[in-house]
Image (cartoon, helix red, strand yellow):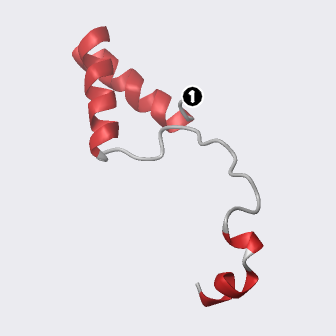
Amino acid sequence: MPLTDKGQKIKGAMVKQYGPKKGESVFYASANKGTITGIEKRKQASKGGLLSGFPKLARKI
């Protein structure tokens, strides 16, 4: 997925510190672990979903 501005900045800093291969590896390892968040742009969620067809159930949740 494409990176946000925050993700590009952090990745650039890690590449500068660790080198191209190791920096990228450390960056994605940290992202997968959850140490750094908000680095990947999300796709737009579709409106509706499962609960839109079940109004009684949607009110309970």
State the residue position of label 1: 2
1 up-or-down from 47: above or below: above
Q: Could you tell me which residue is drawn at 39 percent across and 26 percent down?
A: 11
Describe residue 50's horizontal placement relative to residue 47 as left or right.
left
Q: Is residue 53 visible?
A: yes
Quarter the C terminus occupies:
bottom right
Residue at 55% in and 35% down: 4
Asked where in the image residue 48 lies, by quadrant, the reply is: bottom right
Quadrant position of the N terminus in the picture: top right
Kindly give the residue lying farthest to the top in the view shown.
Answer: 20
Give coordinates of residue 17: x percent, y percent.
25, 19
Q: In this view, does 20 lie above or below 49?
A: above
Q: Quadrant of residue 27?
A: top left
- Looking at the picture, tell me which residue is in the foreground, 24 or 47: 47
Q: Is residue 19 visible?
A: no
Q: Is residue 40 left or right of residue 33?
A: right
Using the image, determine if residue 29 lies above or below residue 36. Answer: above
Q: Which amino acid does label 1 sit on?
A: Pro
Residue 2, position as x, y percentages in the image: 57, 28
Q: Residues within 10 Å of mark 1 (few under 14, many from 20)?
A: few
| Residue at (25, 26) in percent of width and height | 26
Give how far across and how far down residue 54 sits, in percent. 72, 77
Q: Which of 32 and 24 is in front in this view?
A: 32
Work out whether residue 57 or residue 41 is closer to the camera in this orientation and state it: 57
Q: Is residue 1 left or right of residue 13?
A: right
Pick the front one: 46 or 6: 46
Residue under the image location 47 percent in, 34 percent down: 7
Determine the image quadrant of residue 51. bottom right
